[in-house]
Image (cartoon, grey):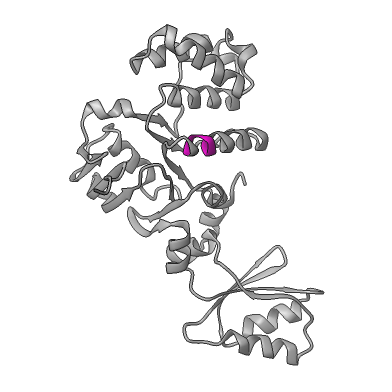
Amino acid sequence: MTEPPAVQLSGIRKTFEGVVAVDTLDLAIPRGSTYGVLGPNGAGKTTMIRMILRIIDADSGTIDIFGERLAPSALDRIGYLPEERGIYKNMKIKRLLSFFAELKGMSPRTSKPKIMHWLERFDLADRADSKVKELSKGNQQKVQFISAILHEPEIMILDEPFSGLDPINQQILKDIIVDLRRAGKTIIFSTHIIEHAERICDHVCIIAKGRKVADGTMSQVKKQHGGDYIAIAFENGSAQAIEEVRRHPVVAQMRDNAGTLEINVKDGADAQQLLKHLVDRNVRLKRFEYAEPTLEQIFLDKVGASDEIMTEMRAHV
């Protein structure tokens, strides 16, 4: 028999004072996957997570964990890193982590070596007896991440885990997430930064205004929602060459990404017409190829491309 998903949402809906935050959402998150939930702020990602954790109740619909209806006992199988950080800043790091481990049923004897292992992994072993408030925000974030995974949960929910981390520590965290996935953990990764989702996740769901607009493995989503996409680069870029592409009738959308034009071709149009047009006008091409769409391009097609949203999605990359 096929194993049930790690998490399954069926018809989940949540409103706040008449405003729909999550709208009849269905998701099946496979066991052992790194499942990215992608969307701009206000899309409903955090509300969905809080319903999985029973922090808030859904207005309607059901939530199953490993094939069983969500119950308080299932929560010990989940580790949670919230977007809004909450750790006791006057406690010493080692004592704080021991306290969180005890809440999950771990004895101090069991948790102590695990605490030191993770502090060493995050280069914090020499700060074990420091108070949390003495750490930088980035190091406080690392301590809270350790508290979420210390009891070795089967499901890990990470809500904006890279917030406050510099590029070096972002890479350390990415490496740890990869290691956890290899160990068979199910990781639900919520973010509004597209690049993180594309590099880390093997499954992805895009949510906009509380609704699911794309869902599946990364390759499935790109195949189903990408359409015909062409990447073009010129030997010597010029405004005239770019304008030749922009005005051509086969072009539905065009974006200039660091000197490479990303083109969506109109349905039924032949991209070879664009190639012939450029060659006939002696435009020197360095690249002209069908390419797999990026997750950002799919997001633009499904959610929209306002300057505010795209600034938000590219932040901290």
In the picture provided, is 109 more to the left or to the right than 25?
Answer: right
In the rendering, at what x and y percent does residue 7 appear? Answer: 30, 42
Above or below, 224 relative to 171: below
- Which quadrant of the view contains residue 250? bottom right
In the rendering, at what x and y percent does residue 36 appear? Answer: 44, 48
Above or below, 86 relative to 232: above
Residue drawn at x 34%, y 39% as measured from the top left: 49
Which region shows up in magenta?
Answer: 177-181
In the picture provided, is 168 more to the left or to the right than 81?
Answer: right
Q: Main secondary structure of the magenta part?
A: helix
Residue drawn at x 35%, y 55% as measured from the top left: 209
Above or below, 139 relative to 82: above
Q: Is residue 179 magenta?
A: yes
Q: Nearer the viewer, residue 108 or 247?
A: 108
Q: Is residue 108 magenta?
A: no
- Give the total number of marks visible in the rendering: 0
In the picture provided, is 17 more to the left or to the right than 248?
Answer: left
In the rendering, at what x and y percent does residue 307 appear? Answer: 55, 59
Residue drawn at x 28%, y 45% as measured from the top left: 3
